[in-house]
Amino acid sequence: MSTVVETHDHDGHHGPAKGLSRWLFTTNHKDIGTLYLWFSFIMLFIGGGMAMVIRAELFQPGLQIVQPEFFNQMTTNHGLIMVFGVIMPAFVGLANWMIPMQIGAPDMALPRLNNLSFWLLPMAFGILISTLFMPEGGPNFGWTFYAPLSTTYAPSTVNYFIFSVHVMGVSSILGSINIITTIFNMRAPGMTLMKMPLFVWSWLITAYLLIAVMPVLAGVVTMMLMDINFGTSFFDAAGGGDPVLFQHVFWFFGHPEVYIMILPAFGIVSHIIETFSRKPVFGYSSMVYAMASIAILSFVVWAHHMFTVGMPLAGELFFMYSTMLIAIPTGVKVFNWVATMFRGSLTFETPMLFSIGFVTLFTIGGFSGLMLAIVPADFQYHDTYFVVAHFHYVLVPGALFGIIAGAYYWLPKWTGNMYDETLGKLHFWLTFISVNITFFPMHFVGLAGMPRRYPDYALQFADFNAMISMGAFMFGITQLLFLFIVIKCIKSGKQAKPEVWEGAGDLGLEWTLSSPPPYHSFTVQPEVK
């Protein structure tokens, strides 16, 4: 036996390769997770830069800084980059890092596919961002790219955008197949489905959602391609098509997509709250069922984005009630998080602060969603800043806070060093305050009737807009502090224990590994009792 071990040790596969080739050709889940996380971080600053252009333009009424055409390109690309280039890759990065460690697997099930899924992303976003440097400019029709704006009236660069979306979709589908295969085939002996960590559950459900809806997105952009280049009329009324068809097909992808962007955050926050409350999460099975219910219901609510297109009354009522129904499993989750904290022995480290921020602000975002679900009210809110306020409250303090909380929670495990707690807390408070200064006033300007995606506005909205822009710049600059904290943590810091957080040792297999974990997580499968 010993000879086997010796020969195995010398074949050089135990450590990473050196230099650039390590990152180009890696099949290791930790390396690929790291690549995804750094990629989404870079995209955060690019997409955030675009948001800064938007907010600088809207700081004062009147056309101030950029041309309206360029403003439209910024709003479109900001949305596309933040959704497909920041939130989703960051969650996939966390999944790559954590799922094998949480289920006691040595790596992902399909490592080469994993490498491919990542490297498709820089290509896709390279293509998308390159359109901004072309003579006609980039996509300028909003991130929802409604026809005919994105077909009949679009710049010729729309073809590059369509190709880019296809490549992103392929990356997501391949990543999802890999995650599902890993979870089903590589769990440690004794780990039944109902013993899996909630983060693993959240990703299993998310992966199914991705496989279900990404082909729909691919379908709708292919129909656009045909309409633009091959003389079909899927979305052109003159040829017998219907622009509303575009909206139906798009939102059939688009609404499950918003749950794809929040479910993994639910998993992360559940782990963090149970760790810092020092007691197991309240109602584990109801958490799993709630996530599954949200995922199933997400397929029957899509037309709530389209209350104003002239649907029949029965349709409007169906989508109104089905949308309200989603509030029930979401409410169950919020109740369970609060119940986990109730009478727990709480400490407020940075991951916990971000998680509590997540629960409170995500709930506000949920309530404004319920307001938008009411059809007669939505006629007033539709296409105003109230909608922008709603989805930024679920995407920034929701998805992004979940990602940041997860990063702080697992950074010591990944690097072997503790991050700077004082700076972490500073980062939280600056982020928390600036997020609310940015997005809370949007509710008011929205209710007063300020339309979204316009480079100019009426004088009465000036004060609130100045405030929103100041909040946005504060939020953007604060994220540079986060970059500093992450780099500082990689380079130096107090040595982290294997369990990192007090009492975390009992909460999952990842805490049984050393900090940083070995290059191949579990060479011998652990037993789960």
Image (spheres, helix red, strand yellow):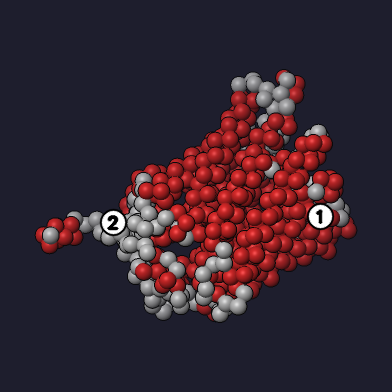
The residue positioned 28% from the left and 59% from the top of the image is 523
Quarter of the image that includes the N terminus:
bottom left
Q: Is residue 482 visible?
A: no
Classify 10 Å Cα crowding around label 2: few (below 14), some (14-19), many (20 and above). few
In the picture, measured across the screen, residue 428 lies left or right of residue 383, that is left
The Cα atoms of the two marked residues, 1 and 2, are separated by 53 Å
In the picture, measured across the screen, residue 410 lies left or right of residue 150, that is left
The residue positioned 45% from the left and 76% from the top of the image is 503
Quarter of the image that includes the C terminus:
bottom left
The vertical placement of 299 against 221, above or below, is below
Q: Position of residue 166 (x, y in %)?
A: 53, 37
The label shown at residue 134 is none
Q: Position of residue 267 (x, y in %)?
A: 53, 59
Q: Identity of the amino acid at label 2?
A: Ala
Q: Position of residue 485 (x, y in %)?
A: 50, 71
User: Which mark lies nearer to you, 1 or 2?
Assistant: 1
239 or 60, which lies in front?
A: 239
Q: Identity of the amino acid at label 1?
A: Gly
The residue positioned 88% from the left and 58% from the top of the image is 460
The vertical placement of 414 against 424, above or below, is above
Q: Is residue 286 visible?
A: yes
Q: Position of residue 504 (x, y in %)?
A: 45, 72
160 or 379, which lies in front?
A: 379
The vertical placement of 299 against 284, above or below, is above
The residue positioned 73% from the left and 30% from the top of the image is 243
Q: Which residue is mark 1?
A: 446
Classify 10 Å Cα crowding around label 1: few (below 14), some (14-19), many (20 and above). many
In the displayed orientation, state which residue is furthest to the right.
Answer: 460
The mark nearer the N terminus, 1 or 2, is 2
Q: Which residue is mark 2?
A: 17
**The image quarter in which residue 130 lies:** top right
409 or 280, which lies in front?
A: 280
